[in-house]
Amino acid sequence: MAADRVGLGWRGELAAGILSNLAQIDVLEVIADDYYRAPRASIDALCSLARQVPVSLHGVGMGLASTIPAEPRRLQAMARLMKTVQAESWSEHLSFVRAGGVEIGHLAAPPRTPASAAGAIANIALASRIIGSAPLMENIATLIEPPASSMDEAQWLGQIIAGAQVPLLLDLHNLYANAVNFAVKPEELLLRLPLASVGAVHLSGGHWIDEPGGAGQRLLDDHLHDVPSEVFELLTLLARHAPQPLTVIVERDGNYPSFEHVLGQLELARSALRKGRST
């Protein structure tokens, strides 16, 4: 059986630390959109990196979870990058990012309905044909329940993953944030997901924000903080119930600590996986 892997999201601010510690990093995840129009030198550098460590490409702008068909030019850009870099996999979000020609600049949760699930399945099929391989699809965090939904998050995700026959990129902090923000037990939400279809995992952190009018607080997924202990506990639970090998990526998008601290986050992930595998 292949082993679990733990890696890191590639960020320019972390480049020196990453390149000096490749032996402690099993895989790197690179934001694909940053390279669609990058100069040749940047592409060559990415290719060089991919020859040293496994690289996966992570898209943020396709908006596949929509009844609007995905834009072929975005899919073709990913196809070219996958071919050039020889990345081992690619992924995107179950979100929409545009409507009516308007870019909203945000990964938004669509209404969780059979129609939006069908739109996502159709877009994933289109993307798979153009790019030449199926994506891992990621659950997203949302501060509000998507209006007009007729399905809950677990039902909606399960219908898409089964219908599209693609692996799930399970963001555990997104799951945790959605659960605590909407009064659901995170462990129960996790166990309702198609865990046998999980191919990769994201770990990140966030912070609490006040609701308008002093109504309470909600957890904002911001990738600017350490992974909380509750999310590592969810990783242990996942490892206990998902026998397939998992690729775990720690995400950090700012407020960077020392690289020794970043490596410590990777070790906490490995420890959580070992704990789950041993019980």
Image: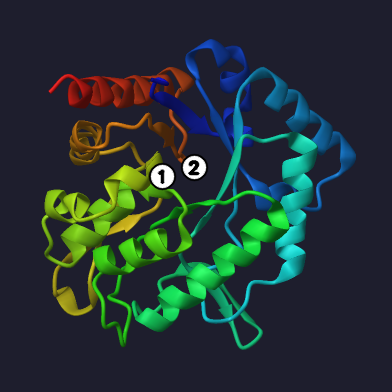
Residue 119 in percent (x, y) is at 50, 76
Is 267 situated left or right of 94 in this image?
left
Spatial CA span between label 2 and label 1: 5 Å
Which quadrant is the C terminus positioned in?
top left
Residue 239 falls in image quadrant: top left
Q: Is mark 1 on a helix, strand or loop?
A: loop
Residue 221 falls in image quadrant: bottom left
Disc 2 marks which residue?
254
Q: How is the image coloured?
A: rainbow
- Measured along the vertical axis of the image, is residue 17 above or below residue 68? above
Circles 2 and 1: CB atoms closer than 8 Å: yes
Is 194 situated left or right of 129 in this image?
left
Disc 1 marks which residue?
224
Say what amino acid the circle numbered 2 marks. Answer: Gly
- Measured along the vertical axis of the image, is residue 39 above or below residue 22? below
**Could you say which is closer to the camera, residue 142 or residue 72?**
72
Residue 41 in percent (x, y) is at 86, 35
- Label 1, residues with CA under 10 Å away: few <14, some 14-19, many ≥20: some
Give the residue displayed 50% in from the left and 20% down from the top.
Answer: 25
Q: Which of marks 2 and 1 is nearer the N terminus?
A: 1
Residue 145 in percent (x, y) is at 27, 76
Give the residue displayed 75% in from the left and 45% down from the top.
Answer: 81
Say what amino acid the circle numbered 1 marks. Answer: Leu
